[in-house]
Image: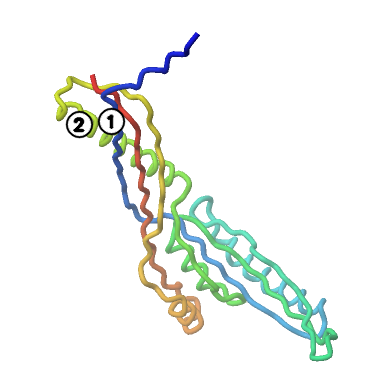
Amino acid sequence: MAQVAPAVPANVVNIAASGFLEVPQDWLSMRLSTTREGSDAVTVQNQLKQALDAALTVARASARPQQLEVRTGQFSLYPRHGSNGKINGWQGSTELVLEGRDFALISTTAGKIQSLTMSGTSFSLSREARQKLESDVQAIAIERFKARADEVSKGFGFAGYSLREVSVSSSDQDVRPYQPRVMAMEAKAAMSDAPVPIEAGKSMVNVTVSGSIQLK
């Protein structure tokens, strides 16, 4: 018995629509670090521990949940080798991370820490802010898709449409202000107890809704 090929659907149109929003970043991560070197591994390790403990004492005094959170970062200790290939000393580094929503508090606290110096900053969206942003942008993209579908169906003389297939994709990017790292590091070294100068950028999320509709 011969097989009957399935009917090719008629009046199917592929369309797509996008939405995006850009919002200020609300989460700051500031890294402070220091290095030590010497001929004895234990001595270098103890020096790093002392520097980190002193920084932790200052930072914990200002810590507040979500506003300023404190955590230790990378701690490393490794040998140095001379031209003969033998170990002739030790070098290590330690890192402290201050992060949260209160940029002023984080900056002021970093300025009070004297045993470590700033090695970098990064801005981002908090988890709650990112989830809300993605939800808002998705709603915008869906509404634009529906409006586009209405426009297409009416343009072809049809009363309406039904969805056949639809997919949602998203992407995001950071929009940062121009701010050389050296500026903040030099300011930290020159002004004791002074807040470290910082400036947040923005995050942008783009959502695209694409699919096919059946014109009716």
Q: Amino acid at mark 2?
A: Val
Residue 113 in the image, given as x and y percentages of width and height: 56, 73
Whole-angstrom CA distance, mark 2 to mark 1, is: 8 Å
Nearer to us in this view, 127 or 56 = 127
Q: Amino acid at mark 1?
A: Val
Q: Are marks 2 and 1 in contact (CB under 8 Å)?
A: yes
User: Which residue was labeled with disc 1?
Assistant: 13
Q: How is the image coloured?
A: rainbow
Above or below residue 87? Residue 68 is above
User: Which residue was labeled with disc 2?
Assistant: 152
Nearer to us in this view, 182 or 195 = 182
Nearer to us in this view, 95 or 55 = 95
Above or below residue 40? Residue 95 is above
Q: Report the residue that reaches farthest toward the top.
A: 1
Q: Report the residue that reaches farthest toward the bottom.
A: 83
158 left or right of 114 in image? left
Q: Residues within 10 Å of mark 1 (few under 14, many from 20)?
A: some
Q: Quadrant of residue 208?
A: top left
Residue 194 in the image, given as x and y percentages of width and height: 46, 76
